[in-house]
């Protein structure tokens, strides 16, 4: 193994083992590690024909104290369970999910980057229906796989922002659809818009599929707005953390963690529908997720209305404070009062 930890990006780097477990007739086998990275799957599998698959993403961190911390592993297990239920798949038991992640870490511990690099070991759990059946209906047999890979810091040159552009031409997910589950089809549906935005140098801000007036997600991440609260005399009274409430977006574990930290900082937290034109009322804005933690927005362009909302080239101080607060927990620089981290000595 010869890895330059400082040159890792958010792309796949092969490790020694993946971890697998199969479910046949409703019974799960124990997870096991294998060097074989290929999944044998029947050509008629319902996961291939009807999109019966879901996945997750979580990280292990080498802490400042040398200990390994896996961040909110059980929450990822619960979210995959919920996704599987939504697709009428046989869910991976929470205990089995966690056992598989710990085994993947143990068998690939040499690929966990050192603390000083800011890089991490990322796990991509995948659940796919393997029942061979071309009739339209859910398959019950499944294959569960955990794919580990070391990844670099999202901001290799420091905590920086990015621009976004509002999209009203492509719907990532519909209300009452699959948007609240982490299924591949949601991401495939976004490519037509997100790839165009990326080619222009922007992240893609998706709007709701019904009216296109409200913010849903920013590419594949939840959206955060920071608003200054003022009195009737326009005196500053504090800050408000605003994030969309929608049944068409994925419940972000990172967003949930940041909301908890914001409340502890005395910041008001609000989940509600956010109109695109409300960007004018915000002092800071960002996308958030596992990969980036927080990715501040420097500006948001709304081409349909010929408006650009400016947030500045440098991350705002509230987002910066939240970003470092969460990273400090993940890297063991402060006490984990919430028990979010599974610590391996």
Image (tube, rainbow, N blue to C red):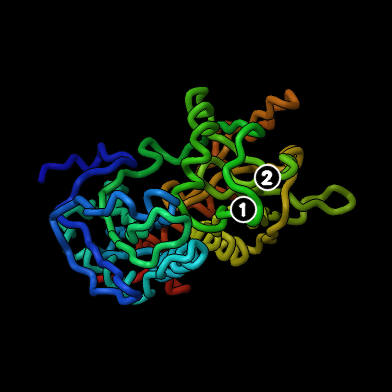
Image x and y of residue 74, in percent: 41, 71
Please give the label number shown on residue 296.
none
- Is mark 1 in CB contact (under 8 Å) with mark 2? yes
Instruction: Answer yes or no: is residue 128 visible.
Output: no
User: Which of 240/279 is in front?
Assistant: 279
Secondary structure beneath dot 1 equals loop
Image x and y of residue 1, in percent: 10, 46
Q: Where is the C terminus found, in terms of image quarters?
A: bottom left
Residue at 30%, 70% in the rendered image: 23
Image x and y of residue 22, in percent: 27, 67
Q: Quadrant of residue 275?
A: top right
Residue at 43%, 74% in the rendered image: 339
In the image, 17: left or right of 62?
left
In the image, 77: left or right of 263?
left
Residue at 23%, 44% in the rendered image: 13
User: Which of 178/302 is in front?
Assistant: 178
Mark 2 burial class by Cα count in 10 Å: few <14, some 14-19, many 20+: many
| Above-or-below relation of 108 to 31 | above
Residue at 27%, 46% in the rendered image: 117
| Above-or-below relation of 208 to 46 | above
Q: Which residue is mark 2?
A: 208
User: Which of 40/247 is in front?
Assistant: 40
Mark 1 burial class by Cα count in 10 Å: few <14, some 14-19, many 20+: many
Q: Which residue is mark 1?
A: 248
Q: Quadrant of residue 4?
A: top left
In the image, 213: left or right of 42?
right
Give the distance between the C-alpha atoms of the residues marked 1 and 2, in whole angstroms.
Answer: 8 Å
Instruction: Answer yes or no: is residue 53 visible.
Output: yes
Image x and y of residue 283, in percent: 68, 42
């Amino acid at each position: 193994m010869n890895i330059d930890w400082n040159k890792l990006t958010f792309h796949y780097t092969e490790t020694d083992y993946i971890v697998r477990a199969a479910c046949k007739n409703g019974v799960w086998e124990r997870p096991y590690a294998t060097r074989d990275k290929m999944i044998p799957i029947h050509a008629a599998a319902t996961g291939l024909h009807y999109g019966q698959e879901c996945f997750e993403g979580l990280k292990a961190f080498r802490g400042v104290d040398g200990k390994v911390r896996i961040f909110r592993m059980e929450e990822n297990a619960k979210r995959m369970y919920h996704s599987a239920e939504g697709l009428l798949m046989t869910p991976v038991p929470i205990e089995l999910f966690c056992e598989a992640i710990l085994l993947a870490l143990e068998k690939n511990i040499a690929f966990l980057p050192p603390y000083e690099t800011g890089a991490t070991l990322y796990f991509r759990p995948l659940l796919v229906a393997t029942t061979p059946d071309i009739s339209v209906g859910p398959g019950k047999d499944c294959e569960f796989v955990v794919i580990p890979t070391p990844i670099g810091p999202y901001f290799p040159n420091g905590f920086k922002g990015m621009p976004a552009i509002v999209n009203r031409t492509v719907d990532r997910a519909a209300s009452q659809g699959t948007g609240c589950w982490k299924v591949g089809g949601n991401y495939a549906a976004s490519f037509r818009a997100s790839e165009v935005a990326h080619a222009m140098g922007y992240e893609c801000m998706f709007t709701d599929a019904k009216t296109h007036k409200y913010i849903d997600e920013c590419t594949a991440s939840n959206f955060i707005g920071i608003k200054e609260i003022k009195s009737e005399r326009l005196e500053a009274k504090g800050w408000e953390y605003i994030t969309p409430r929608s049944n068409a977006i994925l419940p972000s574990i990172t967003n949930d963690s940041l909301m908890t930290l914001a409340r502890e900082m005395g910041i008001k937290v609000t989940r509600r529908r956010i109109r695109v034109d409300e960007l004018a009322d915000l002092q800071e804005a960002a996308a958030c997720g596992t990969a980036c933690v927080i990715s501040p927005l420097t500006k948001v362009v709304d081409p349909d209305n010929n408006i650009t909302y400016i947030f500045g080239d440098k991350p705002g101080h509230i987002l910066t404070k939240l970003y470092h607060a969460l990273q400090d927990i993940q890297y063991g620089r402060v006490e984990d009062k919430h028990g979010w981290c599974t610590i391996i000595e």
